[in-house]
Image: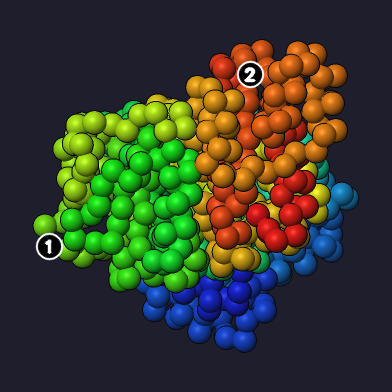
Amino acid sequence: MYNSIATVSLSGSLPTKLRAIAEAGFAGVELFEADVLADPHTPREIGAMIADLGLRCVTLQPFRDFEGLPEPRRATAFDRAERKFDLAHDIGTDLLMVCSSTVADASGDHARIAADLRELGERAGRRGLRAAYEALAWGAHVSDQRDAWALVQAADHPALGFVLDSFHSLARGVPIESLRAVDPKRIFLVQMADAPLIQMDVLQWSRHLRCMPGQGGLPLVDYVRTLLEIGYDDVLSLEIFNDSFRSNSAQVTALDGLRSLIALRDEAGRDRPGGAALPPPISVERLDFIEFAASEADAERIGALFGAFGFRCSGRHRSKSVSLWQQGAINLVLNSEPDGFAAAHANAHGASVCAIGLAVPNVAAAQARAEGLRVPAEEQRPGPGERVLPAIRGVGGSLIEFTAAEVAPEAAWLQDFDIRDPGQRPGGGAGLTRIDHVGQTVAHVDTLSWLLFYKSLFDLRVEPQVDIADPLGLVQSQVLRSRTDALTVVLNSSASSRTLSSRFVDYYFGAGVQQIALATDDIFATADALLAAGVEFLAMPGNYYDDLVARFGLDADLTARMRAHQIIYDRDGAGAYFHLFTRAFERRFFFEIVQREGYRGFDLPGTAIRLAAQTRLKTLPV
């Protein structure tokens, strides 16, 4: 199979789209006729442009409302077809894609439709061209791929073939097993699109909410696996209609598209001998560290904050202005080096999380998978005697650095630090034990892009997206967990420019880590320690605690203790969740302290209360 994408999937002028498609690494392009009509270049010039970029024009599409028409409209339809064949020839493609008719008064008689399709094949064949028939999910008489295939068989012409579109089939619930009845040699084109699993009019669903494979919920892996099993090995092309993509960069969308197809084909072929093109999705065994970038002045303040949280400065880097802060199994790295990546990150975003270190079973395989998915690596220059960890670019230009899971940190990257009391992990402190989860906030238009980044690269479980009420709009939130539970990322975004999430992106000058959740086994003891050290908690309204009693029937003394410590609460069938929030550091990041008692969720009602409380703080857009 080779990769292609339809120009309708991207924003911009036709030359912009074609350059983005070529730069992303696609081999083919479907030319959407509306893009041709709106472009000032002649068809031959467009064809030359496509060829000069090293692309193959897979098809000209769509040719609409052709079959089953009464005379004289039938004759007119064939005249239109001849003109489209002229256009296809001048552009340099041999394939015209024909959609099933949506004209209500066209005949639904299959014999008539097959006769029209056969004549279309005759006319195409005489010119050395081909035509391919597709069942639109909202077609007037042909809306099922099985009917379209039966009609192509009945027409029985070598220049007439069949188009498969995953959205049109799966949106109607057509069984994937029905693909086994199709002759792969008669499949002239396969179009791929994912979509969120929602109930709505299929035409509107298709026109506005299609997305890249891996960004929705359709069973595309099984679909492509079945195509491979029947012997299909030709073009796999994206045809995506999505309002967000039309407003995003063509380069970003094209790269996401190629990444989605690479990951899809890799997963679909993984159980076949030689079918997997990449190493397997990356398993995360440990979250080794979170690194903060800061100026020298900000580093002093952040260091004081870490100290108030009970972290001990347990080491200094041997050659750089970098300190190590530890408590329980948590490693925080504070980098105020005046040159290098961290300094550039701090200059762009202010004091912020610039890197996350993940321990993986096979670092070389992780690098190879990232490279195969077109995820850019970060080249770092080592200092004298310094270890440089392999790294890739992640959300907002931050780094994800890979460490070897089979090597303990003390025997690996920690050797770059002069450690006080080597072999002794800091205990005590404020009772913090590990990193529970990390919240990353991204621009709304980039949400699907970062979802695809994580899903294609790592071995993750993706939970359904939820909407959370911010006082000034809705925030969309999606949880991604590694199957080892070592890494949990919460992606947040908002279409409203006034919400906490959007204001963070504006103030921060991009996406990044907004929230770090730290776990404790005794949140009341931890809260006491933090308060004694001067840590400021986010204040929760009294009405919230009055409602807790009504919702859960909590003990009055427990509720009073929670109120005194600004702790909020949720409970489900698995257990309870206590958590509190700190004030944000310089409008950028804040900490959450959590205690889980069997509970694995994220307290959506409490999150809405937290957003309201943060919005009330006039000095904070976070």
The answer, for residue 345, to whether it is visible in the render is no
Q: What quarter of the picture does the C terminus occupy?
A: bottom right
Q: Residue tagged by mark 1?
A: 384
In this view, the residue in front, 493 or 119, is 493
**Label 1 crowding class (10 Å Cα cut-off): few <14, some 14-19, many 20+?**
few
Q: Which residue type does callout 1 highlight?
A: Pro
Q: For mark 1, give the secondary structure.
A: loop
In this view, the residue in front, 359 or 568, is 568
In this view, the residue in front, 294 or 390, is 294
Q: Quadrant of residue 378?
A: bottom left
Q: For mark 2, give the secondary structure.
A: strand
* Mark linked to residue 576: 2
Q: CA distance from mark 1 to mark 2?
A: 49 Å
Instruction: Indicate the position of residue 267 as horizontal and vertical percent values.
Output: 40, 36
Q: Earlier in the sequence, mark 1 or mark 2?
A: 1
User: Where 416 falls versus 22 (above or below)?
Assistant: above
